[in-house]
Image: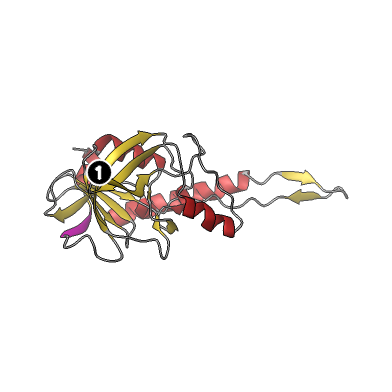
Amino acid sequence: MLKFATALTAAGLLVSSMSASASAQPITPAHDGAPVVRVASPPKSVKPQFKRQRVHLVTNEAPGTIIIDTNNKFLYLVESRNRATRYGIGVGREGFGWSGVVKIGRKAEWPTWTPPAEMRVREAAKGHIIPAFQEGGEDNPLGARAMYLYKGGRDTIFRIHGTTQPWTIGLNMSSGCIRMMNKDVIDLYDRAPVGTKVIVIGPGNKQGEVSFEDRGIDVLRTLFGG
């Protein structure tokens, strides 16, 4: 039944996408009077599996812990030994992945962005000039919220944050930070206080032994809440 509902949803999204694409193709007259159809690029969207879900997550980690599975592009907020909220994320591209156990050291709404000097140099070499500082707002790369990850009382320079590029969710695109859709990072921000334990599972295995198993969508909670 779940597969059937998912298929219907996917079909509906496809039809909606095709309709939106068709309506975004303005027709203008050519110089010889013949109509010219301007073909718009198809809208980019997040894949269904990376939408926020209530799932069965078997783990020994305490409720309130955040587990970030960078390999599968999921972030889990543990709610009990068998329950969690799962969010889709974007993670570090090749060479920028990392692992470890950290904590949320501080949080900010509509955060400002001060990119590291090495990032500015690296991007400038590619012809991308980025500012030394950017005020918070809808066009800020950190999106609507940021949770700053600390280890041993020091800022790791990595963050869990929103994004102005939601189509990058599910991809390896960042310089090591964890990207979320703005609506998802707002939800997590409201539920994860400063001091929250964050386990990042990725290259290097510096997170140590972590036991968790995602057993899929919690259908009853999804349908009826709770």
The answer to whether residue 1 is visible is: no
Q: Which of 118 and 12 lies nearest the eye of the viewer? A: 118
The answer to whether residue 39 is visible is: yes
Q: Which of 9 and 102 lies nearest the eye of the viewer? A: 102
What's the residue at 50%, 46% (across, down)? 16
| x, y percent for residue 127 | 61, 56
Q: Which of 152 and 29 lies nearest the eye of the viewer? A: 152
| Residue 74 placement, left or right of 62 | right
Residue highlighted by disc 1: 222
| x, y percent for residue 25 | 66, 46
Say how many tags the image has: 1
- Magenta span contains residue 83: no
- Magenta span contains residue 214: yes
| Residue 185 placement, left or right of 219 | right
Residue closest to the far right: 32
| Residue 134 placement, left or right of 218 | right
What's the residue at 87%, 48% (across, down)? 31
What's the residue at 22%, 39% (across, down)? 224
**Colour theme:** secondary structure
Q: Quadrant of residue 208?
A: bottom left
Image height check: is 151 above or below 92?
above
Assign the N terminus to one quadrant of the image: bottom left
Q: Magenta span covers which residues?
A: 211-216
Assign the C terminus to one quadrant of the image: top left
| x, y percent for residue 78 | 19, 47
Q: Label the magenta part by its dominant secondary structure.
A: strand
Is disc 1 surrounded by few (<14), some (14 to 19) or many (20+) residues within 10 Å? few
> What residue type is disc 1 on?
Thr
| Residue 94 placement, left or right of 1 | right
Q: Of helix, strand and loop, which one carries label 1? A: helix
| x, y percent for residue 108 | 36, 35
